[in-house]
Amino acid sequence: MQQQLGAAPSGKEYIKRVIGLPGDTVECCDEQNRVLVNGVPLEEDAYLYPGSVESHTEFGPIEVPEGYLWLMGDHRAISYDSRMNQNNPGGGAVPIDHVVGRAFVIIWPFSQAGGLGVPATFDELNASDG
């Protein structure tokens, strides 16, 4: 019942964080084990799963192809994301047309329920879209 209402995953959809856009260079990691995008380290403490490190797998540098996104899950130790798919077409990046939406709310666990805003990182990108 929850799956039909969209309140539980069906097993076919995955929620991942967009780390790199087309043309970005993504790599792991700097001396503090942070993921770099275009040479700038990401500060990910606010959303990574408690106790998780930015990546358990070194990768890159990888230039995200046109029409693709570099995606990573927040629970990096168990996330089957772009890092784990580098031998597939796209080099681990996911075609943009495979994205079906943006997560906007957390419903489980109840202790973390609430809305998900858009990070300030995207302010400049959204402004350029007009």
Image (tube, helix red, strand yellow):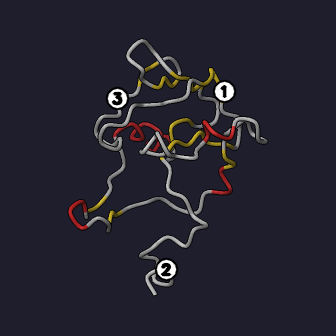
**Label 1: which residue?**
63
Disc 1 + disc 2, Cβ < 8 Å: no
Pinpoint residue 73: horizontal percent, then vertical percent: 48, 46
Give left or right: position of 54 versus 37: left
**Between 71 and 129, the one nearer to me in the picture:** 71
Ranked by sequence position, the earlier of labels 1 and 2 is 2
Work out how far the residue at label 1 is from the one at label 2, CA to CA, in angstroms: 36 Å
Within the image, what quadrant is residue 115 found in? bottom left
Q: State whether residue 112 is above or below residue 76.
A: below
Q: State whether residue 108 is above or below residue 41.
A: below
**Label 3: which residue?**
43
Q: Residue at x 70, y 43 (%)?
A: 67
Q: Residue at x 57, y 64 (%)?
A: 13
Give left or right: position of 121 versus 61: left
Q: Secondary structure at mark 2?
A: loop
Q: Label 2 neighbourhood size at 10 Å, few (<14), some (14-19), many (20+)?
A: few
Disc 1 + disc 3, Cβ < 8 Å: no
Give left or right: position of 118 versus 10: left
Ranked by sequence position, the earlier of labels 2 and 3 is 2
Tell me the kind of residue under disc 3.
Glu
**Label 2: which residue?**
3
